[in-house]
Image: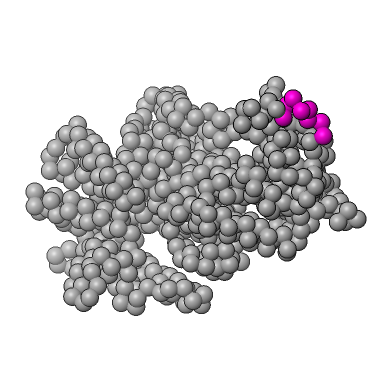
């Protein structure tokens, strides 16, 4: 969405001021802007190679596929910002995913019953508690026992994967509750046309309100204001981007067979040409948007986020400022565990059960997403929107190249080149800037 | 001044690192509106002693009395609660954060809902920095991109903003140019006039001689002597730093040896 902002400022650059100055006025993060540009280029390239990839259904499938890693990437940013690493996320996702499956396939039928309407909610709650517990355990070893996070989570990577086998008896466990599976998206696991528009409009109103509110605050304190044109431009571009995304999501209709079943079940007479039901925004995407907003809020508006960044920038300074650094580190790992539970819910809902290899290799994609998104291993630097964009870049390559018929080893090679190139260009840029 | 209660009394403080006694049974005091210079060679124990007062390090034994009241200082938070602010030699700034974030680090202003109140913090930072460094404008830049003097100003602003009663300054002018050093000296005088007690650690004997009311000299973890500045010369102090003895105890021979070396 920031891309349009750039082209617009180009057009307005006819005056005395340079394009760069005008761009600065919008206070748009140059890095994020570049990543949005790269993402658009990737999709244009994919579109040239095979235009059918630009159909709405592919965007929806892609967004659902990217959801699991995007959720994890937001937590990985904070872990890396605090000078740690979490290699265990893939195995933790697998373990919690298996936990969901075992609970729903083996325990629910004999206890609360399959028809219990809140069964999926109980499963999710237990999963979150389990995730927090795993995070607290690893976080304790890292923060209080002072074992390096690389070692602890490498142990987690191996150990939790082993535990999945123990837990499941070495087989796939299925099925999940049908209501739980809605978290994995699909035509039924989406908001539908009307709710999608409502969701989009709420987000637009919130964005416009935030812009107004921040302007009012800055005025109150007499700080320099963003020029009005820049302010409106950012607002308009955001609104257009959000509503455009809703439009694309709604332009995908339920498959004919599913629509016919739905019509029969609800006693609707199908019109000629079939019932047209707008799918709208998939639930996993709603979850990703919710997680992104929450995590951005946590990092930029709460003490906890400030403490993490201060620790990452200078651990001694953070301790001398009276920050309880151990507790802060432990909390980041608990948060990571909670995000693993959310990611596991999306991933296992898509599979309708728990498999032995669920989440395998996630850690690498998630770390790559965070790093491509501008997170620095030196600590103290990284953003949540950057990590989301990084996850989209990684997943676009994976999904797109897969769609074009490349096999996964080939996709991995491309992803590797992109990772090293992006980080290389970035560090070169930073060196030049300083 | 003697009939006043000291604002700080550190009694019989000892700190050991493994087998090394960094500070041995040191007692030192400070009165409101007074500057006490703490001098000594490398490893004399002055920074360690001050780290105990600022809560960065725990003493093995000894007592700290603040304003006539015994206080236990286990961490930097306790020290700050007792009105003790410290400007560390390293400045202890988070380089990736901006000036307001550093100024309020660990003590952020929040809204009623507990969210960080960035605008109020920036406003407060603008006011306090306006006093210390009126030309400073880079309030939203990471402090990494600031000059040495500007960074120092941020570290000082942090100590000044929270109305310290007791200020510890560890080598406050070591990294500064002449103009900025003069600025810091003026600030020390100004704070002293406001009734703040200041411990000033410095290698620069002239810095100390210029600003301090009393000077405590440390040598190998002990206090050699605490003297009123007007009772001694800089040479007397130098002698104490190097030889670890009071001026009267130094023999002619030792002075000769020193002069030969010098």
A391 left or right of B49 in image: left
A297 relative to A361, above or below: below
Residue at screen point 46% across, 73% down = A223
- Residue placed most toward the observer, A67 or A269: A67
Say whether residue A21 is left or right of residue A53.
right
Residue at x 76% of width, y 52% of height: B213
> Overall secondary structure of the magenta stretch?
helix
Instruction: Please tell me in which quadrant of the rendered image residue A196 appears.
Output: bottom left
Question: Residue B38, percent across and down?
Answer: 71, 43
Quarter of the image for the N terminus of chain A: give it.
bottom left
> Based on the displayed image, in which of its 4 quarters is residue A168 positioned?
top left
The magenta stretch is B248-255
Task: Give the x, y percent position of residue B80.
Answer: 69, 52
Asked whether residue B66 appears in the rendered view, the answer is: yes
**Residue B148 left/right relative to A383:** right
Q: Is residue A325 above or below residue B188?
A: above
> Whole-percent x and y of residue A67?
33, 48
Q: Is residue A342 visible?
A: no
Specify whether residue A123 is painted magenta. no
Return the residue nearer the eye: A32 or B13. B13
């Amino acid at each position: 969405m920031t891309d349009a902002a750039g082209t617009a400022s180009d057009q307005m650059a006819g005056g005395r001021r340079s394009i760069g100055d005008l761009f600065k006025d919008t206070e748009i993060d140059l890095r994020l802007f570049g990543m949005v540009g790269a993402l658009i280029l990737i999709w244009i390239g994919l579109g040239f190679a095979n235009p059918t990839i630009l159909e709405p259904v592919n965007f929806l499938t892609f967004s659902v596929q990217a959801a699991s890693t995007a959720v994890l990437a937001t937590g990985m940013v904070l872990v890396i910002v605090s000078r740690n690493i979490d290699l265990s996320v893939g195995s933790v996702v697998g373990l919690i995913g298996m936990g969901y499956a075992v609970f729903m396939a083996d325990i629910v039928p004999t206890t609360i019953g399959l028809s219990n309407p809140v069964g999926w909610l109980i499963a999710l709650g237990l999963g979150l508690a389990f995730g927090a517990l795993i995070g607290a355990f690893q976080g304790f070893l890292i923060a209080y026992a002072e074992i390096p996070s690389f070692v602890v989570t490498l142990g987690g990577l191996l150990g939790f994967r082993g535990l999945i086998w123990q837990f499941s008896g070495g087989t796939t466990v299925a099925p999940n509750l049908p209501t739980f599976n809605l978290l994995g998206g699909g035509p039924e696991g989406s908001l539908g046309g009307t709710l999608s528009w409502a969701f989009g409009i709420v987000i637009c109103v919130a964005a416009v309100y935030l812009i107004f509110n921040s302007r009012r605050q800055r005025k109150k304190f007499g700080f320099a204001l963003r020029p009005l044109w820049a302010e409106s431009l950012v607002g308009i571009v955001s609104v257009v981007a959000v509503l455009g995304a809703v439009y694309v999501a709604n332009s995908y209709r339920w498959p004919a067979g599913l629509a016919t079943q739905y019509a029969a079940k609800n006693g609707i007479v199908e019109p000629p040409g079939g019932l047209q039901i707008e799918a709208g925004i998939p639930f996993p995407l709603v979850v990703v948007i919710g997680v992104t907003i929450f995590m951005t809020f946590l990092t930029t508006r709460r003490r906890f986020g400030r403490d993490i960044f201060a620790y990452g920038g200078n651990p001694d300074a953070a301790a001398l400022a009276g920050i309880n650094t151990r507790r802060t580190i432990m909390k980041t790992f608990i948060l990571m565990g909670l995000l693993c539970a959310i990611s596991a819910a999306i991933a296992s809902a898509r599979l309708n059960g728990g498999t032995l290899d669920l989440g395998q290799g996630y850690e690498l994609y998630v770390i790559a997403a965070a790093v491509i998104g501008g997170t620095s291993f030196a600590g103290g630097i990284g953003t949540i929107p950057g990590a989301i964009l990084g996850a989209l870049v990684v997943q676009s390559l994976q999904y797109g190249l897969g769609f074009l018929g490349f096999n996964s080893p080939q996709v991995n090679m491309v992803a590797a080149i992109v990772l090293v190139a992006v980080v290389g260009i970035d560090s070169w840029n930073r060196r030049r800037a300083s | 001044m003697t009939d006043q209660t000291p604002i700080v009394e550190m009694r019989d403080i000892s700190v050991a690192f493994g087998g090394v006694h960094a500070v041995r049974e040191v007692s030192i005091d400070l009165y409101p509106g007074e500057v006490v210079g703490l001098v000594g060679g490398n490893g004399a124990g002055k920074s360690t002693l001050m780290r105990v007062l600022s809560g960065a390090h725990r003493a093995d034994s000894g007592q700290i009395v603040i304003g006539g009241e015994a206080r236990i200082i286990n961490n930097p938070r306790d020290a700050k609660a007792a009105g003790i602010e410290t400007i560390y030699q390293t400045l202890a700034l988070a380089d990736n954060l901006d000036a307001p974030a550093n100024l309020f680090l660990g003590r952020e202003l929040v809204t009623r809902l507990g969210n960080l109140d960035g605008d109020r913090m920036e406003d407060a930072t603008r006011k306090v920095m306006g006093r210390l460094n009126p030309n400073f404008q880079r309030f939203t830049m990471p402090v990494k991109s600031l000059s040495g003097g500007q960074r120092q100003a941020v570290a000082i602003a942090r100590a000044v903003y929270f109305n310290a009663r007791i200020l510890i300054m560890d080598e406050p002018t070591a990294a500064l140019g002449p103009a900025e050093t003069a600025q810091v000296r003026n600030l020390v005088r100004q704070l002293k006039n406001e009734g703040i007690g200041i411990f000033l650690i410095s290698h620069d004997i002239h810095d100390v001689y210029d600003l301090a009311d009393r000077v405590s000299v440390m040598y190998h973890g002990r206090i050699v002597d605490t003297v009123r500045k007007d009772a001694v010369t800089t040479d007397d102090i130098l002698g104490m730093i190097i030889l670890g003895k009071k001026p009267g105890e130094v023999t002619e021979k030792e002075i000769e040896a020193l002069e030969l070396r010098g």
